[in-house]
Amino acid sequence: MVTILANMVLKSYGSLEDLINYYIDQMRSQGKRSWEKVYADIQYNVFTVLDNNIPAKEINSAQIRKVIHKIIQRGAVVQANRVRSYLHRAFELGIFHDNDPKSLSNEFIFNLSINPVTAVPKNASAEKVGERALSFEEIAVIWNSEKIDAPIPTLLAIKLILIFGIRPIELTGAKKSEFDFKSLTWSIPPERIKNKRWHLLPIIPQAKQLLEELLLFSGESEFLMPGRYNPEESIHKTSLGHSLKKTQKQNIHYPVFTLRDLRRTAKTRMGELGINKSIRDIIQNHALSDVSSKHYDRWDYMPEKREALEKWSHYLECKLMS
């Protein structure tokens, strides 16, 4: 008993950097793609203000406020909320670490009694649920973009996201092998899917035409949208968003929207058509939380998805011609 206690006393107290590394390791082990961005944000916003070698147990609410205040001073109020959220989760995990029997073999403990971030309020007014859904007048500008000063792959990708209502990374990271033009099926693998399950989408005629045009720009790369300087990799997940912003700056009549707005637009306009919400959710691969969907329903709903997307595509074409 004395030996065990002595070993516990000899443990060092984990630093702020140890705490962040523990948090990031947890994200990576859970397969969360955002870990790189989270780590970069913390390095830039936290480690430039606080000494990363200070024991995590010595961090107090006043120091957390200082970090968040620095971000708000730059006008980045949304980013301030994000960093607050990251730190809150990191300290929560630190407390969990010390109480987890699996951590007894670790070389340090955090010895945290409270989460210092809890006392620092979130700026509730900084973030609002997105409400932007493009009008058909705006969609017409996007669709009739022959004279727009922008890379053609960017314009094609924007149209495909609007047709499928997909997340941008599901398209920008796609490999050519995912597209079966005989069965007209697009199979998106789990590593690019939020819920880590295969997602099957029907390739309707309108999408097939756009994909075939996009393939012309891919060269010998295995990716549908290869990197500009390294065709052995797909374009970076943020590249399409950056290209869109540049397009909007260079073309004053081009609508201002985000890629996420396209996903919301597809969901909203499909609803106007009378397409059932459950089918719209399945097309966009929203995780269904009911017991039946999670554990028993293994039907892929391809006929229903194809019918809905063809109906949406036809409606889109009719509206653009009117």
Image: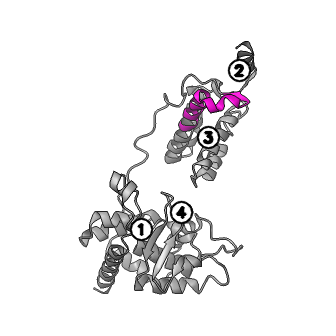
The span picked out in magenta is 89-109
Spatial distance from mark 2 to mark 4, Cα to Cα? 41 Å
| N-term mark: 3 or 1 | 3
Q: Is residue 163 above or below residue 66?
A: below
Residue 108 visible in the current orientation: yes
Q: Residues within 10 Å of mark 3 (few under 14, many from 20)?
A: many
Q: Dot 4 corresponds to which residue?
A: 190
Numbered disc total: 4
Query: Which label's residue is closer to the chain start, 1 or 4?
Result: 4
Q: Nearer the viewer, residue 306 or 160?
A: 306
Horizontal placement of 281 versus 53: left or right? left
Q: For this view, does 289 lie left or right of residue 181? A: left
Label 3 and label 4: CA atoms lie apart by: 23 Å
Query: Looking at the figure, which quarter contains the C terminus?
Result: bottom left
Measured as percent of width and height from the top left, residue 44 is found at 66, 45
The label shown at residue 126 is none
The residue where tag 1 is placed is 262
> Hey, which residue is sitting farthest top in the picture?
2
Q: CA distance from mark 2 to mark 1?
A: 54 Å
Q: Earlier in the sequence, mark 2 or mark 4?
A: 2
Q: SS class of the residue under badge 3? A: helix
Q: Amino acid at mark 4?
A: Pro
Q: Earlier in the sequence, mark 3 or mark 4?
A: 3
Residue at x-position 71% and y-position 18%: 4
User: What's under tag 1, amino acid-wise?
Assistant: Leu
